[in-house]
Amino acid sequence: MNSLNQTWKELLTRIPAPADNPAASCAEPESAFLRDRPLLHISPPTGWLNDPNGLCQYQGVFHAFFQYSPFTAEGGLKFWGHCTSPDLLHWDFKGVPMMPDELFDCHGCYSGCALPEDGLLYLYYTGNVKESGSHDYVHTGRQSNTILAVSDGMQITEKTLLMTNNDYPSHLTRHVRDPKVWKQDGTYYMIQGARTDKDQGVALLFASLDRENWRFIHTLQTAKPFGYMWECPDLFELEGNMVLSVSPQGVPADGLRFQNRYQSVVFFLKGDFRSAVVGDACQELDAGFDFYAPQTFPTDDGRRILIAWMGMPDETTYGNPTVSYGWQHTLTLPRELSIQDGTLCQNPVRELSAWWNREAAFTGDFCCRSERCFELELVSQGGNAMVTLAGGLTLSYQEDTNQFDMEFQNPQLGNGRKKRSAKVKILSRIRLVADLSCLEVFLNNGETVFSTRFYPQSEGYEIQVQGCIQGIYRTHA
Ligand code: FRU
């Protein structure tokens, strides 16, 4: 039993009786509690999880906070849940350190980040406040407060209100949120997402010399609007490039691109980020169904890691049956970022490769019964290839169209999810990580990634591989 399962079990014994806590009413028996629950992906013990927040390595330990509604699997008032890990694979749930308990955050402790410095964790986040009265909560009625909470890594000792809507540029709606802070050349920078009064998604840059007093310095935006709102922006240096990551809302589908309700994309900035104009060309970060609001952080050994919410806000055509067991959503696996030929690549952290301790290598076609958690690494020579999971989810490549499809033939398996596709010029490698109801597929060393939740009816199911020249099936005993 790994430590995360252990923590859930302990937690289960502490969850109040159903009458006090609606989420807990579905949490028993234990088989339902653990059903579909991944081993390595962060999931909430009860209730609803969304964006990763405050990702960092602090005093050697990895911390992942997340948007959390503990009392209902359908979402509600937002707290921050908290997990820690020694290795980015095994996560311990540490409780709910951030609560909407001040007038300036009383309708939700919205997304934010962590800055580890001087032996403390500085947590920046948005305090959401909805005023009473008749409002659309876009142009009036909402306060988006920028708040700093100081933590020792476990508890929050103080909260300070840093900025209100009056401190943001005046042409914005009330939607301003999700601060991400970093330090560069002796200056602190903060980026926040916003919606202008002309319904354009933009990112705001602020600077500070002391972590507390912030000055607005620049708006990062495309020449033509790309969505009406940018959520959860991030800006980081990677291999000499300044990468702007945003989660835009309101971008129409464009052929195979932008098929989800909301998107997550990166732009490579040209020139100084403090004055840059964002170019038109962006890269969609994930071609699957369940990926939103990614956040990155640097590790002590110099890697840049990305974790996203493995879910999709406001999606009505597909869902997650775990709601009936009292919890919903997970985060993605932590992914290492790199750049190859101008493309941002994402691959599972190297700790995962070291964790598998059983493997079976094969050449040609392959068929086996799966474990609950496994990895398949396949080599292809660019011809047609197909992986079928549980007889009803196909991952297939068509050489003549250069198209890779993820398609649910069995509706129960996808719970409403149907098909997502991406163009892949030459398919050389497929790496697939399945962890109970979480599936992530990395093509060509992470150039293209598909993330999805899926719901096989039994823990072991058939895996079939056709058209690849060789492969390795890996598990952990
Ligand atoms: C993105 C988001 C953020 C916000 C948070 C609220 O999913 O809408 O913009 O801070 O979720 O939970």
Image (cartoon, rainbow, N blue to C red):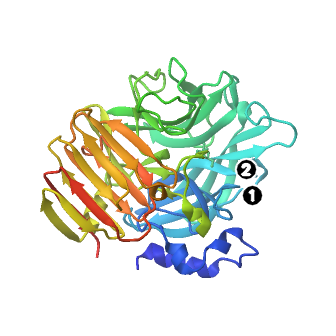
**Where does the image place residue 319, in percent across and percent down from the top left?**
55, 54
Q: Residues within 10 Å of mark 2 (few under 14, many from 20)?
A: many
**Where does the image place residue 111, in percent across and percent down from the top left?**
59, 48
Check the picture and name the quadrant holding the N terminus: bottom left
Q: Are marks 2 and 1 in contact (CB under 8 Å)?
A: yes
Is the C-beta of the residue carrying label 1 under 8 Å from the nearest atom of ligand 1? Answer: no
Check the picture and name the quadrant holding the C terminus: bottom left
Task: Please tell me the numbered disc located at residue 105.
Answer: 2
Which residue type does callout 1 highlight? Answer: Asp
Residue at point 15% right, 64% down?
361
- Of the four image quadrants, the one with ligand 1 is top right
Residue 472 lies left or right of residue 315; in this view the side is: left
Residue at point 47% right, 45% down?
294
Residue 204 vs 455, above or below: the answer is above
**Structural distance between the alpha carbons of marks 2 and 1:** 7 Å
Residue 102 lies left or right of residue 258; in this view the side is: right
Residue located beneath label 1 in the image: 101
**Where does the image place residue 369, in percent across and percent down from the top left?**
28, 69
Of residue 14 and residue 186, the one placed in the foreground of this image is 14
Residue 16 vs 76, above or below: the answer is below
